[in-house]
Image (tube, grey):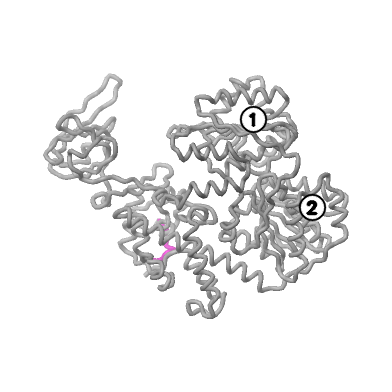
Amino acid sequence: MQVSIEISSLKGVGPKLNEKLNKCGIFTILDLLLYFPRNYEFIRANIAFEEIDGEEKQILSCRVKGFDNDIRTRTGKYISGIKFEYDGHIVEGKWFNQRFIKNSYKIGQNYDLVGKFKKIGNRLEIINPIIGCAQAKSSEIIPRYSLKDDLSDKILIKLINQVMADVIINDNLPKELIEKYNLIGLDEAIRSIHFPKGKVELENAVVRLKFQELFTYSMKLLLLKNKVRSNDGIRFKLVDELTDLKLSLPFNLTNAQTKVVREILNDQRSPYPMNRLVQGDVGSGKTIVALIAMFNVIKNGYQASLMVPTEILANQHYLEAKKLFEPFNIAIELLTGSTTAKEKKRIKERISSEEVIIVIGTHALIQEDVQFSNLGLVITDEQHRFGVEQRSKLINKGRRPDVIVMSATPIPRTLALYIYSDLDVSIIDELPPGRKKIDTKFFVDRDRNKAYDLALEEVGLGRQVYIVCPLIEENEKMDLNSVEKLYDELKDGIFRDTSIEILHGKMKPKEKAEIITAFKEDKTKVLISTTVIEVGVNVPNASIMIIENAERFGLAQLHQLRGRVGRGEYASYCVLLGNARSNTTKKRMEIMTESTDGFYISEQDLKLRGSGEVFGLRQSGDAGLLLADIYEDTEILKCARGEARILLGSKEPMHMKTCSDIEKSIERWSRYICFN
């Protein structure tokens, strides 16, 4: 069986099921096997009658004794009943509005029923039980997958079982690594992550696959670093006009900014390509550092590009650059997904010519038909949102250009050295003078009116308000406030006499731009938004942010969101609303209310996370990782990175004589599986 075989070739996968699988990103056999469970349900099987408590789900093998007549309730619902026997006790199964359920059962046969069994005297009762999957007989751990439409776990499990029966998965890590870290085989890991026989087997599978991911991740970064440093770079001169630019600034650079600018300019003067991370807290002034770096490159006669993750941020940087560089006769263009076809053609022609130009844009910059003629500097902002491959694509558009990546997500320095092992690290750990301290409060849901009373007071003083929600539309299955639900509630309630708008990622770029512009121009007083405003929105008049369901966000994201206020001359507030049922949530909220130091918050976040919960798996994570979390799995990352360095540093690593051989094999490692 080949990895590239389309999923539609499997028995039982017709056009409709194929479409549903495609919506989950499953197009091939490989996609199916790498579609790991999002989490697991731990269910005890066939326990003694005395141990059943009715609080947790069980799997009991029950024999059908007989069928009851359907009962119609006063509300018109039908109750269908089947009597089972388990361990000498009667089990009454009841289903609501499932009149055909009896067709699925036969008298005298055993079925694995899954659900919560309630004790009533010497009998058991279960409402709407399901028939357990084949795996349930031998396992107490049931996989749960991320599903769309009416696709079920049962269907996925059936398909994965079908593939597993016809495939052998070969190991593709060096044997010495597997033995050194006592890792299980790849075949066993893939099978155990889908169908674990116990918690130990699941943990071993997760560790093996995380190691493999982080080993590959480290190899990619180290190869990128080797490639950059093995080439001659562009040796830039420091132009005299840098002094004029510095004098034209309406503010003085902080000591931290000055130090980082010096490090960048020293890199530009060197004969080797720069490859540097500029890390700074929210509002620390990374943008001006980037603009100074681009200015020197442009005045040396080379082109420069700045890639950012959102159009909002691209537009903001473009306007800042235009304003700063206006006296210096520097050409600047903006290239995003919403740029018109006519404008895109004009800009691309200009980029491919010999013209000295700065181009600011989104992912549109890495399209194949964007060809720079003389690219000297590549900057990516919000680095954590771009993968290594995306960064490489932009770098490869030039002949050994200098590279700067910027991140406003503070990471402890020791951890940054592992995560960004291909980069030299610069840190801006000082905020510009005049930035207002943000007073952060946490209110439980029952006190949420206090938050909105404070917001109304600020509006009365002429200020503006951000309100952030985790969802766009109301979700009946999750008790969370959505943008649309909250908008309807507030516009007819406390903000009925106030201009109020909503903003979310599903809106068209033009619509989003109009809403942001109206907010910046103070035409809108209250903006209800998803995390689309996490980066790129700079409104000095906004003095308060309310974050609904704050417990749903990570500390780094809460800190990023909070950074949208406190940018003007006014006292500013961030109010966190939510539930704090667990001690961990309470501690996280305490950290946010006690500190506005992003680096301190990141250190505390790392301590709280510990080594992570191996049984709560993620589907698709940062850096293109499926399972591993570069923050939580630091110990595995350190080991994997160390082995990658040894491998690349040896004369004949794994019997491969050149880095190009290793690079080719990385694709094999990163795809996990070799099939027989």
Residue under the image location 34 percent in, 65 percent down: 167
Q: Quadrant of the N terminus?
A: bottom left
Q: Is residue 164 above or below residue 452?
A: below
Classify mark 1: residues with Cα within 10 Å, few (<14), some (14-19) or many (20+).
some
Give the amino acid at mark 2: Ile
Give the amino acid at mark 1: Glu
Magenta stretch, residue numbers:
1-7
Classify mark 2: residues with Cα within 10 Å, few (<14), some (14-19) or many (20+).
some
Q: Is residue 81 above or below residue 601?
A: above
Residue 639 image position (x, y, % from top left): 48, 64
Quadrant in the rendering for residue 538: top right
* Along the viewing direction, whichever of 222 and 32 lies nearer the viewer: 222
Relative placement, left or right, of 539 versus 54 is: right
- Residue for badge 1: 501
Residue under the image location 48 percent in, 32 percent down: 579
Asked whether residue 412 is in view, the answer is yes
